[in-house]
Amino acid sequence: MPVNELSDDELRSAIFSRIDGDACQYTDRQIFEETSRRAESGDRKMRFMLGTLHYRGIGTETDADAADEAWISSFEDAVEGLQTIAYSHYAGSLGLDLKRAGNLFCRAADSGGDDYLLLRAADCYLAEYMESRDDSMGVLAFNCYRNAFPDYADSWRGLALCYMYGIGTEVSYPEAEHILYAAENDGTDVTDMKMLLNEIKHRGYYFK
């Protein structure tokens, strides 16, 4: 039977066979091209399958960006799609990629999602900075925390850390103190952060 005569269920079965490494009467390229054709016609389930083919490199080159875009477009709500795929990268179910997760969280916020998503993006960028010491990740973390401040209490902690250790900005103990006192006045317990700041100030310790 020609691949274009397969039902959607039969095509998905062929795709899962290839994912599992099993033999199939159709070539990987045939499977990819037919999935692409159905995805382009607006079939959201096939868009999701197309993302899987890009991610696995079945019938095409492995392409994480193309996989993400196909997966995201399979959701009726773009913001929901961006968040779902971002969390998948953040949690590691698609392979841990904190920078990619942060970028998707930012896109979700820019597309009309809750500003809380900026805080999630900031956490991703900060974690990536801690791992790679890539200054550009520090700048992204700082900017996201700053844009989420003061609406979300968790942003105070992250922003204060950035000023205390010079992550994405210059070291500024007065700015860190201002943020922590604002958090405290709002009812947030930041005792541990204030103790840390006092220790840093007295020891002259810098996070390198």
Image (spheres, rainbow, N blue to C red):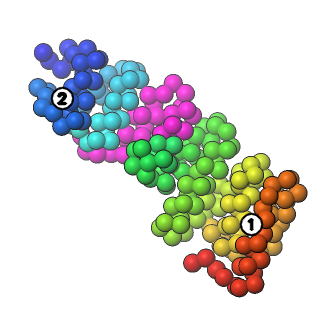
Residue at position x 86%, y 53% in the image: 186
Q: Distance between the residues labelled 1 and 2?
A: 59 Å
Residue 134 location in percent, x, y?
50, 68
- Badge 2, how many Cα within 10 Å: few under 14, some, many 20+? some
Residue at 37% in and 46% down: 64
Per the rendered image, the range of residues in magenta is 60-86
Q: In which quarter of the image is residue 47?
A: top left
Q: Position of residue 159 (x, y in %)?
A: 70, 62
Quarter holding the C terminus is bottom right
* Residue 153 within the segment the image draws in magenta: no
- The label number, if any, that marks residue 56 in the structure image: none
**Residue 146 against residue 16 in the figure, above or below:** below
Find the residue positioned furthest to the bottom: 203
Q: From the viewer's perspective, tell me whether residue 112 is left or right of residue 135.
A: right
Image coords of residue 154 (percent x, y) = 71, 53
Q: Which amino acid does label 1 sit on?
A: Asp
Residue pictured at 71% horizontal, 55% vertical: 155
| In-image side of 41 versus 32 (left or right) | right
Residue drawn where x is 15% and y is 33% of the image: 22
Q: Quadrant of residue 194?
A: bottom right
Whichever of labels 1 and 2 marks the residue nearer the N terminus, that label is 2
Q: How crowded is mark 1: few (under 14 residues within 10 Å), some or many (20 or more)?
A: few
Residue closest to the eye, 205 or 66: 205
Q: Name the residue under label 1.
A: 192
Q: To which quarter of the image does residue 57 belong?
A: top left
Q: Which residue lies under the disc numbered 2?
A: 30
Q: In this view, does 6 lie above or below 34?
A: above
Q: Can residue 39 be seen in this view?
A: no
Residue type at mark 2?
Gln
* Number of disc labels: 2
Q: Could you say whether the residue bearing mark 1 is in a helix, strand or loop?
A: helix
